[in-house]
Amino acid sequence: MLVLGIDTSCDDTSAAVVRDGREILSNVVASQISLHHQYGGVVPELASRKHIEWILPVVCEAIEEAGIDPARLEGVAVTSGPGLIGALLVGLNFARAFAYGLSLPWVGVDHLEGHVAAIFLERDFPAFPFVALLVSGGHTILYYVTGPARFELMGQTRDDAAGEAFDKVSKMLGLGYPGGRVIDSLSRKGDPARISFPRAYMTKHGFDFSFSGVKTAVARYLQRHATVFEREIPDIAAGFQESVIDVLVRKTVKAVEEKKTDRLVVAGGVAANSSLRKRMAAEAGRLGVALYIPRPELCTDNAAMIAAAGHHHLANGETGAIDMDAYSKSTLTKTNDVTNKSTTKISSR
Ligand code: KG4
Ligand code: ZN
C-alpha cells in the first residue's frame, strides 16, 4: 500500500510517500527554523501561516520525488495531534481535502505513535513487545509497546520534556533555537564533570521524570557567575547534557528490567543526540538487550513516520471522520495512575 504521510504539528512542514509502512520513497521536510530562530522559540501563528504557504509545494515535491503518479496513492495519513492546533489544522484539512479529491481513505495519526513507528522504517526493527523511550521537544515518556498502536504508559515527565530543557538551556546560554543539536555538538568540546548539575531520579515516582530542576540549576549557575566566559560554555552544556542523559538512561534501564524485555526502542527528536545514542548502546550491550534507534533524520519530526503509523490503521480499514478535529494533548499520555507502573492499556483510537 502506497501511503502519503503529512505532518504539520509544529514548525516543520513535511510530506512523505511510504510503501507498506516500511519503505520510504520520499520524505520532504521544510524547516521553519530560520523564521522562528529570531524569537528564541516557535511562534504558533507564524508557524500556521508558513504551513499554509508550504503545504502544497511540499506535498507535490514528495509525490514527485517518489516518482509516482498521485493516482497510485492508496491512502493518506496525517498528524491530528498533539501539537499546535493552528499548525495541525493546516495539515489535517489539506489531507482531508486531498483524500476526498482523489477518493482515498485517510486517517488521523497520533504524533507520538508516529515517533515510535519511525523504527519500522529501518532495515533492522524490533518484534513486539518492547520498551520505548520517547524523548522529544514536547514529551518524555516510557512505554511498553505490545503491538502496533498498543501503548502501555509506564511513566512520563511531570514538568518539562527533555527536549524543552535542551531548548531553554540553549536560550539561556545565548545559543538560540532549537537548542538540542547545538548543545549536542558543543558538549563534545566540553568537560561534563567540571560542573555538576542535579539529577532528578525521582526514585519514589516510578518511571516519571522531571527536568525543570536541572534547567533552573543552570539558570542559577549563570546568575551566580555574573561573567561566564565563552570558553566555559561547552563545559556548562556538557554538564547539563550529562545530567539529562544520566536520568534518561537510568530510568530506561529500570523499565527494561521491570518488563524483562530484551528489546528497547529510543525515539523522538532528542534520540538524535550523539551522546544519548552512545550511552544507550553501552547500557544495552551491558544488559544484553537489542537497541533500536532510528537514524537521526527519522528521530526528528518527519512525515514518513506518520505514514508508517498510518499504514497500520489504513490496513485495518480505519478511516477518518469528516468532522475530525485536531487536538493538543495526546491520549497516549493518559493513565489512571502516573505515580508508578500503570497497566492501563491505551490504543491510539
Ligand atoms: O521530535 P521533535 O522533532 O519534535 C517534537 O515532537 O517535539 O523533537 C524536537 C526536540 C527539540 O527540543 C530539539 O532541541 C531536540 O528535539 N533535539 C535534540 C537533538 N536534535 C533535536 N536534542 C538533543 N540532541 C540533539 N542532537
Ligand atoms: Zn515530534
Image (cartoon, rainbow, N blue to C red):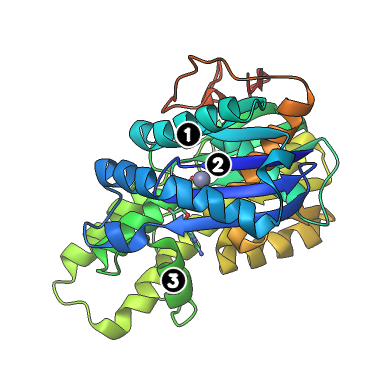
Confirm or deny contact between disc 2 and disc 1 (CB under 8 A): yes
- Image quadrant holding the C terminus, namely top right
Pointer 2 local density, CA inside 10 Å: few below 14, some 14–19, many at least 20: many
Q: Position of residue 238 (x, y in %)?
A: 44, 71
The mark closer to the camera, 2 or 1, is 1
Residue 260: image quadrant is top right
Disc 2 + disc 3, Cβ < 8 Å? no
Q: Please rate how many residues cluster around mark 3, counting C-alpha atoms within 10 Å: few if below 14, some from 14 to 19, many from 20.
A: many
Give amino acid for label 1: Phe
The kind of residue on which mark 3 rests is Ala
In percent of width and height, residue 42 lies at 30, 49
Mark 1 or mark 3, which is nearer the start of the sequence? 1
Which residue position is annotated with label 3?
238
Element under label 3?
Answer: helix
In the depicted structure, whether residue 243 falls above or below residue 120: below
What secondary structure is marked by label 2? strand
| Residue located at (17% from left, 66% from top) | 224
Q: CA distance from mark 2 to mark 3?
A: 35 Å
Label at residue 94: 1
| Label whose residue precedes the other's in the sequence (2 or 3) | 2
Residue 90 position, x and y percent, is 41, 35
Q: Residue 6's mark?
A: 2
Work out which residue is located at the far left of the displayed protein and give it: 226
**Other residues around mark 1 within 10 Å, as few (<14) / some (14–19) / many (≥20):** some
